[in-house]
Amino acid sequence: MQKLKLEELGLLPLSPSHLNRFVSDRAIWLMRKFFKLKSPYNINMLRGHAVEWGVEEGLKDKFKKIRHTTNDKGVIINHPVLSYYDKLVQDNSFHGEQSIKLRIGLPEMVNAAITELNKYGKLISAQDWLKFNIDIVIDGETYQIPFTGRTDFFMESEEFGRVLVDLKTTSRMPSTSVRYDTRLQQVLYSRATNFRTDLLYVGYGQVEKIIDGKKKKVMGPKTKIMNVENDPKVLLRVQQTIIAMEKLLRFSDDRNVLKEIILPNPDDFMSWKDDEAYQMRKEIWGW
């Protein structure tokens, strides 16, 4: 049996984010895997980490003895998640209006997420790493492809059984559909555990409340829960993506050849707003 190029090059185990990057932005995939581009943090990721931390601590009853105070607009101004977020911002040298803007409503988001998660029963574990394999047939030979991935909250109750809940912080609630990259992750996790997987979106913005008998728009937390069905088409695309990655590397695993057949999209603002990625792109492709 031919040895996998993915294994030879140290690209195993795979992860959902690895597959998604190969599909959505192959130039960044090449830069990360062959030119050692580091994955930068951004301020939205730091807010997400802070909310996850606050929710886990809250589910473990770490905040019960804390008395919250609010400002004249009813916004909580003393909560451990605020201190945690401030440290993340300082450690990663993020400053400016955006970091201040995303700080607003963090305690409310944490509390709203805890309320939703408590409906699933008790917390079994949080921030676990999953390890599992997927069988892939390449040129008539079957390979076991190892995967790894991190789950957010593992909940259990008599009503729902065991459920993996993935927490997503967002500025805009999804409508009726779940993005493909998110579905891919959840389908793989459901397949690996045989547990139901749900998405819990939490954000902060304008919400409607009844005040003095009238509907009024005020600032507050928003939540939305979405279930991800185990769609076999997603698994098919996973298999096709792995095969495409392996066959590309069998064609060539020389990064200087790969950079000639993989070109970046200069209009992809999200990829190039990171200065390190932008400078590396100029070094590799000259523009």
Image (spheres, grey):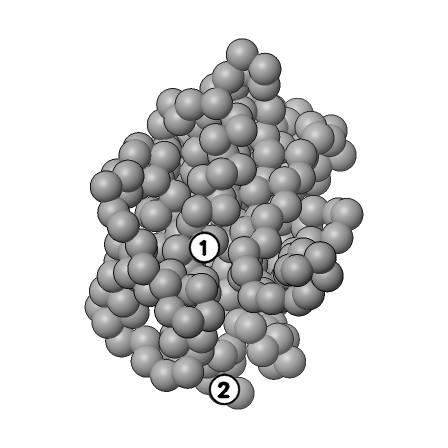
Report whether 102 appears left or right of 259: left
Q: Residue at x 55, y 15 (%)?
A: 161
Is 72 situated above or below 2?
Answer: below
Report whether 9 appears left or right of 164: left
Per the image, the residue denoted by label 2 is: 286
Task: From the image, state whether disc 2 or disc 1 is nearer to you.
Answer: 1
In-front residue for pair 191/260: 191
Tell me whether the residue at label 2 lies in contact with that at label 1, contact meaning CB atoms closer than 8 angstroms: no
Number of other residues with Cα within 10 Å of mark 1, as a class: few under 14, some 14 to 19, many 20 or more: many
Count of numbered circles on the image:
2
Q: Residue at x 41, y 83 (%)?
A: 97
Q: Where is residue 219? Give x, y as percent.
A: 56, 66
Q: Is residue 50 visible?
A: yes
Please identify the quarter of the rendering in which residue 44 is found. bottom left
In-front residue for pair 35/218: 218
Kind of element beneath mark 2? loop
Q: Residue at x 55, y 60 (%)?
A: 220
Question: Which amino acid type is marked by label 1?
Answer: Glu
Q: CA distance from mark 2 to mark 1?
A: 47 Å
Q: Where is residue 252? Give x, y as percent.
A: 52, 55
Q: Where is residue 208? Give x, y as percent.
A: 68, 59
Q: Of the two numbered discs 2 and 1 on the same chain, state the one appearing first in sequence.
A: 1
Q: Residue at x 36, y 63 (%)?
A: 70
Kind of element beneath mark 1? helix
Per the image, the residue denoted by label 1 is: 108
Report whether 148 appears left or right of 259: left
In-front residue for pair 141/101: 101
Question: Which amino acid type is marked by label 2?
Answer: Gly
In-front residue for pair 131/210: 210
Q: Where is residue 81? Give x, y as percent.
A: 31, 55
Is 53 situated above or below 264?
Answer: above
